[in-house]
């Protein structure tokens, strides 16, 4: 899950997400993927437009539908744990739209600082994103 968050919020490298999905069994090694870069580019087309939306404008069900269509095309298998996480995200979406409709979680660098604490504490090359204090 952190691979997805880091990719979406920081560097946009969706090949990392595709490889993570292969590693945990969502995409099997024998799946007819084609080049990983192609799958990553298609995944990016589904995810990226949603990253600039405020919580009140996000539709997780629409995003999930697009991801399921893409998953079916590539023969992906849903892992039980990820299905449960998705269910919890649907609850989150319901309450977030009510309580914080103008909040954009995907662009909150303070949140990222706390999710990727070790990376934030390690020395960073110049030009890399600096997190808020």
Image: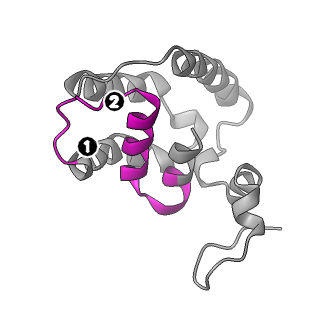
The kind of secondary structure element at disc 2 is: loop
Mark number for residue 39?
1
Q: Is residue 37 left or right of residue 120?
A: left
Asked if residue 4 is positioned above or below residue 117 in the image, the reply reads above
From this viewpoint, is residue 122 visible?
yes
Q: Quadrant of residue 107?
A: bottom right
- Magenta segment boundaries in residue numbering: 7-35
Q: What residue is shown with label 2?
A: 27
Tell me, yes or no, whether the highlighted magenta stretch contains residue 65: no
Residue 3, image x, y percentages: 53, 46
Marks 2 and 1 close (CB-CB < 8 Å): yes
Residue 130, image x, y percentages: 68, 73
Q: Is residue 99 left or right of residue 53?
A: right
The kind of secondary structure element at disc 1 is: helix
Asked if residue 1 is positioned above or below residue 116 in the image, the reply reads above
Q: Residue at x 65, y 36 (%)?
A: 101
């Amino acid at each position: 899950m952190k691979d997805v968050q880091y990719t979406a919020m920081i560097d946009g490298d969706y090949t990392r997400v595709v490889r993570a999905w292969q590693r945990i069994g969502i995409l099997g090694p024998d799946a007819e993927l084609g080049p990983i870069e192609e799958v990553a580019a298609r995944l990016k087309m589904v995810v990226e437009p949603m990253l600039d939306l405020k919580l009140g404008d996000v539709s997780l069900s629409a995003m999930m539908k697009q991801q399921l269509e893409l998953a079916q095309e590539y023969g992906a298998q849903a892992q039980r744990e990820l299905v449960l996480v998705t269910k919890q995200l649907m609850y989150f979406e319901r309450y977030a739209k009510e309580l914080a409709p103008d909040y954009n979680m995907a662009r909150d660098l303070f949140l990222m600082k706390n999710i990727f604490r070790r990376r934030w504490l390690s020395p960073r090359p110049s030009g890399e994103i600096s997190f808020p204090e």
